[in-house]
Amino acid sequence: MASKKTPTPKRSVKRAPRRPKGRKEPGIQLKVVLAALFLCGFLVLSLVFLAHLRESLRPAPAPPLAPPPPLVSDRQVLLEDIRVELESALLRSGLSLDSLKFTGADPQYIRIKGAMPPAGIIENLAQRLQRLSTDIRLQVSPAETQVVLYWENRLRFQLDFQPPEIPPPPAPGPRVAIIMDDLGRSMQTAQALLDIPLPVVFAILPGEPFAAPMARLAHKNGREVIIHIPMEPQRYPAINPGSDALLTRYTDGELRRRFRTFLKQVPHAIGGNNHMGSHFTENRGKMATVLDEMKQTGLFFVDSLTSGRSVAFREARKAGLPAAVRDVFLDNDQDVAKIARQIRKLAKVARHQGSAVGICHPYPQTLAALRQEARYLKEQGIEVVPISSLLVH
C-alpha cells in the first residue's frame, strides 16, 4: 500500500524592505562629495601652477629710460670746435698733449711747455678759425710767448707758451788756429796743404803769380783766406818785403791805394796779417790808417808780432776791428822733429789760456810735421779751428 508523503513545510523568505524611489544610499553621497572636493582642489592647484608658470615665463620689465640729455647750444658747439682747432695746431707744431695744461672754462687758459709754433702754422690756424666764424680774432704778443683768441669781442682762449730753458753751451776745449804765410808761389804746395786734415788758414802774398787762383782754390775747399800784407821791416832796404810793400814814408792816401790793390789780387780774403813789418807795426799812425781801411772793407787783422814793440793789435782793438795775435812760430827751425815740438808747444799754450795762434811757412818739413801731428792734436782734444773763431771782438 502506498504510503502518503508528508508535505514539506514552506520556508518563509524575508525580503528586505523596499527603499522609496529616488533615495540613494548614504555611502554614495559621501563619495560624490569627496570626488567634487578633489576636483575643485585639483582645479585650484592647476590654476595656481599655471599662474606661477606664466609669471616665471614673462620677460623682465625693461629698465626705465634715462632722461634725455640737455640740448647743447650752438655757442657751446662752436667753442668746442675752436678748442679742437687750437689743439690740432699745437700738435702739428710738434707739441704733445702732455705739454698742455687747461684751466678755466670761459675764457679757457692753456699753458704750454714749449715754444711758439712757426708763423706758418699760426697763419693756417687763423684761416681755419675764420671758416668757423668771421668774428674770431687771433692776436700774438710781440715777444711771441702768448696767443689770445677773441670771439664776440670777448676773450675766449689764452695760450701761454713757456719755451724750455736752453742750457748754456759747454765751455769749449782748447783750440788752436794755424796760419800758413807766404803762399801764392806754387799750386802744388796749395794742393798738398789741402790734403792735410787740418783747417790751416791760407795767408797769401798779393804780389805772387798764383795769388788769385790759389785764393779761389782755398775758398772752394772751405779754407779761410787772408792777405799776407807786406810791410816795412827793420833794416829796410837790406831786408826787402817786396816792391809793393807798405812803407812808413808813404802818405796815408798811398797806403790806402796800395791796400785796395791787395784786395783785388787776393779774392775771397776775409782778413789780413803782416808779412815782415817789424818797423811798420811799431808806427801807431801808419797802422791806424791801414786798420781803418781794413775796417771799411769788413776785414779783421792778425798781428804776426814780428816785433815785441808792435802796436798793431792794440790799435786794431782801439779802432773796433776784430783782431788776434800770434802766440807761437812753428818753423823757425826747418826740421820735422823741431817743428813737431813747436806744434805740441802750441797745444800746451792753448790748454793753458784756452786758445792759441800758430804761424808757419810752406816748407816741405812744415807740411810733413803738420801731417804727422794732426793725429796727436786730435788725441789730445785740441781742436784746430779757422782763425775767425779766435778773434777778439
Image (cartoon, rainbow, N blue to C red):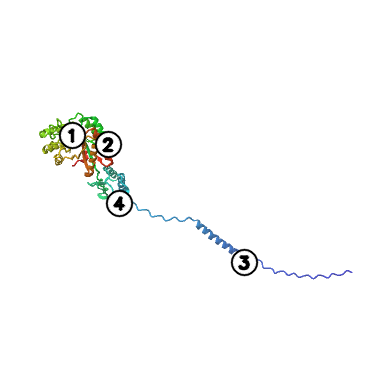
Q: Secondary structure at mark 3?
A: helix
Q: Nearer the viewer, mark 4 or mark 3?
A: 4
Tell me whether the residue at label 4 lies in contact with that at label 1, contact meaning CB atoms closer than 8 angstroms: no
Residue occupied by mark 2 = 372
Mark 3–mark 1 CB contact (< 8 Å): no
Q: CA distance from mark 4 to mark 3?
A: 92 Å
In the drawing, does residue 67 fall left or right of residue 388?
right
Quadrant showing the C terminus: top left
> Residue 90, how many percent across, how many down?
30, 46
Using the rendered view, name the quadrant where residue 374 is placed: top left
Q: Amino acid at mark 1?
A: His
Q: Viewer-proximal residue, 74 or 306? A: 306
Where residue 124 appears, as percent x and y from the top left, is 28, 42
Looking at the image, how many numbered discs can be counted on the residues? 4
Q: Circles 4 and 3: CB distance less than 8 Å?
A: no
Residue 294 in the image: state x and y as whole percent.
15, 36
The answer to which of marks 2 and 4 sits earlier in the sequence is: 4
Q: Amino acid at mark 3?
A: Leu
The residue closer to the viewer here, 114 or 346, is 346
